[in-house]
Image: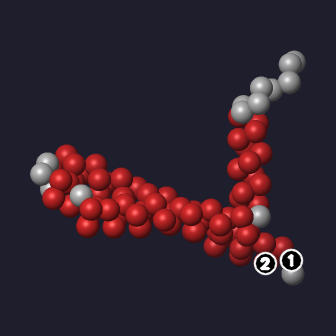
């Protein structure tokens, strides 16, 4: 079997494992992820508020996207909390 190409699924899973298994790296990514919904909230409220409210579809897509981004951050924070509990229990 030929070696996998660079940028393949194996590289992606290796990167994900490196991020998910290191507490400091998880926290860095969590901090970066929080910036997306915060930026969307600020832009939606102060930057393009009038443009968004011109169409119900824009409202749905913009605030729906903000909700999805927020849910992703919440799920990642929950994963981090559970991983910390698991790490602390295994260190006893």
| Quarter assignment of residue 30 | bottom right
Classify residue 11 by image quadrant. Answer: top right
Q: Which mark is residue 88?
A: 2
Identify the residue at horizontal 74%, vertical 69% (top origin).
Answer: 23
Asked if residue 90 shows in the view, the reply is yes
The N terminus is located in which quarter?
top right
Image spot of residue 82 (x, y percent) = 66, 70
Residue, x 77% and y 45% (percent of image)?
14
User: In this rendering, is residue 49 above or below 56?
Assistant: below
- 34 left or right, relative to 29: left
Residue 80 at x, y = what percent?
Answer: 64, 68
Which type of secondary structure does the marked residue at label 1 adopt? loop
Identify the residue shown where x is 32% and y is 62%.
43
When the figure is inspected, residue 9 is found, relative to residue 32, above or below; the finding is above
Q: Is residue 71 visible?
A: no
Q: Residues within 10 Å of mark 1 (few under 14, many from 20)?
A: few
Task: Please identify the residue farthest to the left as the structure is shown.
Answer: 54
Quarter of the picture containing the C terminus is bottom right
How many angstroms separate mark 2 from mark 1 (CA)? 5 Å
Residue ranking furthest to the top? 1
Residue identifier under label 1: 91
Determine whether label 2 and label 1 are within 8 Å by CB: yes
Scheme of colours in the image = secondary structure
Determine whether the residue tagged by mark 2 lies in a helix, strand or loop: helix
């Amino acid at each position: 079997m030929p070696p996998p190409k660079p940028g393949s699924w194996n590289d992606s899973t290796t990167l994900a494992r490196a991020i998910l298994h290191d507490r400091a790296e998880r926290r860095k990514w969590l901090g970066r992820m929080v910036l997306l919904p915060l930026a969307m909230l600020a832009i939606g409220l102060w930057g393009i508020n009038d443009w968004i409210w011109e169409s119900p579809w824009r409202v749905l897509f913009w605030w729906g996207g903000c909700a999805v981004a927020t849910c992703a951050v919440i799920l990642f924070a929950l994963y981090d909390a559970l991983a910390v509990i698991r790490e602390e229990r295994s260190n006893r």
